[in-house]
Amino acid sequence: MRIFRILTSLLNQTSGILRMVAMQNNIVLSMRNINKSFPGVRALQNVDFTLRKGEIHALMGENGAGKSTLIKILTGVYPKDSGQIFLDTGGSLKEISVKSPHEAQNLGISTVYQEITLCPNLTVAENMFIGRGNYRLVNWRSMKKKTSEILAKLNIPARATQQLGTCSIAVQQMVAIARAVDMECKVLILDEPTSSLDEQEVEKLFSLMRELKSRGVGIIFITHFLDQVYEISDRITVLRNGEPVGEYEVKDLPRVQLISKMMGKDLEDVSTLKKRKLPDERPDAPPVYEAVGLSSTNCPNAFDFKISKGEVNGFTGLLGSGRSESVRAIFAADKITGGRMKIRGKDVKIKKPKDAMMHGVGYLPEDRKRDGIVEDLSVRENIILALQVMKGFFRPFSRAEAEAFADEYIKLLGIKTASMDTPIKSLSGGNQQKAILARWLLTNPQYLILDEPTRGIDVGTKVEIQKLILKLAEEGVSITFISSEIEEMLRTCSRLIVMRDRRVVGELKGEEMTQDNIMHMIAGEAV
Amino acid sequence: MGNFLKKLTRSQLVIPLFSLLLLVVFNLIRDVEFFSISIVTNNQGYPVLSGNLISILNGASAIAIMSIGMTLITSCCKGQDISVAAVAAIAGSVFVSVLRSHEITIPVIILAFFYSCFVSVLFSLFNGILVAVFKIQPMIATLILFSAGRSIAYWINGGATPTVSSPLLSAIGGFIPGIPIPTPIIIMVIFMILISLVLRFTTLGLYTQVVGINEGTAHLNGINPVWVKLTAFMISGISVATAGCITVCRIGLINHETLLLDAEMDVILSVAIGGTALSGGKFNLYGSVIGAYIIQALTVTLYAMKVPSAAVKAYKAVVIIIIVIFSSPVVKDFVITLYKKLFKKRVKTKIPIKAV
C-alpha cells in the first residue's frame, strides 16, 4: 500500500517534470525585458512576452500602449534598446537579433498587417512567391501548382491565376497568411486583421486561424474588438503605457477586468473619483445642436444626439468603436447618408463642413497631422484659416488683421513659437494643437467638437486644454470632448455617450458616470 | 547674420535670384557690352529700345505668362499641366480664325482674344475636371490634350496655316508706335499686376496652398478642393490663351504644329527653378516668372557666345541640371549645416577673447 503510494507520487512527479519540459519545449517565442525609447518617450519598459506553439495570443492595450512598438521590434523594423528575444529553432530556444523585416521573415516570423501589403495587380500565385529571396528563374507551372495546393489545403476560396485585387479583402488577407504559412513561419503576427471585414469574413478568417493553430503555429493577434478576442484567443497579454500589465488565460479574465487593465484603473479605485456637477438644466431652451437618425458613409449605424448650451459631453468607447466617426458625422466631415439636424431648434441642412461652420460648429480632428495642421504654412495662416473660409473667398483678411488675430490668440493660449510666421510644422505637438484650437476659438463657435485634443502632447498642455474646455463651457460654449484617457473625460464631461462596435450602446449622466459603469457598458454587460 | 542667412535660405526666391545674378555676372565678365541697351529706329520709323536685355524680357514673356497659371496648378494639384502649349495652339487658332472672318480693328481683336480665352478656359476645365473630380494624375489627364491639342488646332482653321497681317497685330506682337518698349513685355507686366490683384483681393493664394499641402485639412475647414483646383485650371486657361495670342501677333500667322512647340517643358522648368516644389504646396509666382527669364537669358547668352543653335539645348540642359541640383533639399540642408558649423566656430572663437 505504502509502496504503491510512493510509486504514484513518484509517477506524479515525473509526469510533472515531463510536463514542465514539454511546456518549455512548447514555447516558440520569448521576449524578455524589452526596452525601447524614442526621443522624449519611453515606449516600452521591461516588457516580457511569451508565445507558445499552437496558441492564439491576443496582445491588448489602448492606443500608445506599445503594441506596435513591440511588434516592430520583433519584426526588425526598430532596433531594441535592451532585452532579449528567444526563438525556437529546431527544438531549443536560441537568442536571435532581428535587424530587418526580411531577416525576421527568414527566421519564421511573419506579419500580416491591417492594410494589405501585397500587390493587388499581380495574381495570387505571384503574390505567394514574390520577394522570397530566391533569385532563380521562375517556374510558372510549379508555382501555380504549389499555390493551388496551398489554397486547397487551407480552404481559401481563390484561384492561383486570379488577380489578387479581384478577391475580397478577407481573401487577400488569407492569401497573405497563406504566404506566411508557406514560408514555414513559426510566429504569425496578425495586426488588426479584422477591422475591414464583415462578420462572415471574420468567421472565415477565424477558421483559418484555428487550422493554423492546430498545425502548431503561434499566432499573435492584435485587435480592438473584444468579442473576437474572447472568441478565438487562448491567452491575453495586456500592455499599458509601454509597461506590461500581465499575461492571463482568457477564461480567467472577465471582460470588465480586461478593460480596466487596458485603461489602467482598478475597479476599487473608481469610487474615490470626484464627479463633476451637471450644469443647470434649462429644459425650455432648445438644444444647441440636435441630430436625429444621423448616419454617414463612415458611420453607418444611425444615432441620435443632442447637446445643450454650456454642456460638455463626450463619446467614449475603445479605439475603433466609432466615436470619431460619430463626431465626424455631426460635423458632416464624411458624406451624410441620413438623418435630420437642428441648430437651436431650427431645422438646418448640414451637408459639408462649411455648412456646419456657418452654423457655429467647430471641429478639431483626431489626427492633428493628417487633418489638422497645414504643415508648410505659417502659424498665422493656420490660425486664421477657418475664420477666413467663413468670411468668404472675396474678402481676404489684410496682413494687419491676420497678424492681430494671430497675435491675440498666440498670447491667449500661450503658443510657444519663434514668430507667427514660423511654419507650424516646426512647433511641438502641444503647440500645434493649441494653434488648431486657436483656429476654432477665433471663429467664436457655439458648439465645439474636440476629438482627442490631448493626445500626444505633454502633461502640462493637457491640463491647460482641459481647463480651457471647462472655461469655455462656463462661457456658454457647448463642447463634445473625446479622449482615450477616461479620467480626463470624467473630469470634464457631464454626460457620456458609450459606444461599442460602431454603435451607441448607452448614455451615462451624473452619478452614473463612473469608470466601473463605463467599463461594464463597453464590455456589453448590464450596468 | 545667422538669422539673416536662415531667412534667406528658407525663402523660395534664393535660388532663382542667385542663378539670375550668376548669369548676369558671367555675362558682364564675358562681355561688358552684353547688357547695353541702344535706341534704334525700327522699319516703321519709330525709335525703339534694342539689346540683349530687351530680347530676353521680350522673348520670355509668353513662357512667363504661362508659368503663372502653371504655378497655381502645380501648387494645388501636385502635378503639372503638360498640355499648355497644345492648348495655346488651339487658342491661337481660334484667335486667327475670328480675325480672318472680320476686318481687323481693335474691337475685333479684343473679341477674338475673348473667344480664344473662352475656348482655352473650356479646354483647361476639361483637364481640371479630370484632375479634380476624377482624381487622375495631372500629367496623365493632360496627356490627352497634349497629344490631341494640336490636331484640334488643325481642324479649327481647316488644316491651313493662315497668316494675318495688320499694323494693329504687329503693334501687339512688336511695338506700339511711340512706345519704345516691346508690347509683350507690357502685356506681361499687366498680366502680373492683374494676378497680384487677384491674389490680394481673394483668398485664392491661401486656399491653393492649403489644398496642395493638406487636402484633408482643407476639406475640414470648409474649403472645397475641387473648386480650388478648377479655379487654378481656369486661370491657367486665361494665361495660356494670352500667351498663344501674343505669339500669333508676333509671328503674324498661326502654325498649329510649331506654335510654342515644346514650351510646356520650359514652363514647368520655370516653375521648378522659381522655387515652387513640383510636388505642390507653397508657391511663388514671382519666382516662376524669374525662372522664365533665367531660361531665356540662358538661351540668349548661349547664342551670344556663338554656340551653334543645334547645341544650345544641350548647354541649357547642363546649366539647368546644376540649378535644379542646387535647389534640391539635400544641397540646401548641406549648405545650412555648413553655415551653422562655420557660424558656431566663429562664436566659439569669440567667447575666449571676451573672457580674457
Image (cartoon, coloured by chain):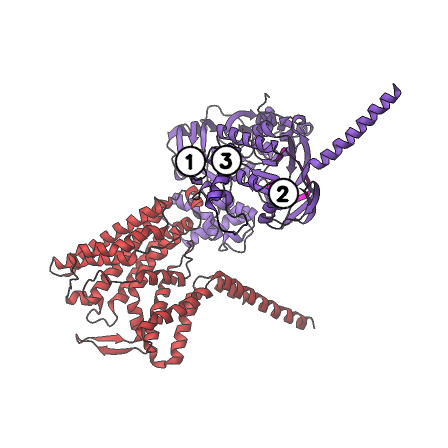
Q: Is residue A124 left or right of residue A49?
A: left
Front: mark 1 or 3: 3
Residue B120 seen in this snapshot: yes
Element on which disc 2 rests: helix
Q: Is residue B313 magenta?
A: no
**Residue occupying the far top of the picture:** A1
Label at residue A303? none
* Chain of the residue on which disc 2 is drawn: A
Label at residue A332? 1
Q: Position of residue B48 (x, y in %)?
A: 23, 75
Query: Which one is nearer the viewer's eye here, A485 or A202?
Result: A202
**Residue labelled with disc 2:** A70
Q: Position of residue A260 (x, y in %)?
A: 64, 30
The answer for how far apart the CA atoms under marks 2 and 1 are is 37 Å
Residue A316 seen in this snapshot: no
Q: Which residues are magenta?
A: A42-69
**Residue labelled with disc 3:** A151
Q: The N terminus of chain B appears in which quarter of the rendering?
A: bottom right
The chain assigned the colour purple in the figure is A
Which colour is chain B painted? red
Front: mark 2 or 1: 2
First along the sequence among labels 2 and 1: 2
Q: Are marks 2 and 1 in contact (CB under 8 Å)?
A: no
Element on which disc 3 rests: helix
Query: Which one is nearer the viewer's eye here, A36 or A509?
Result: A36
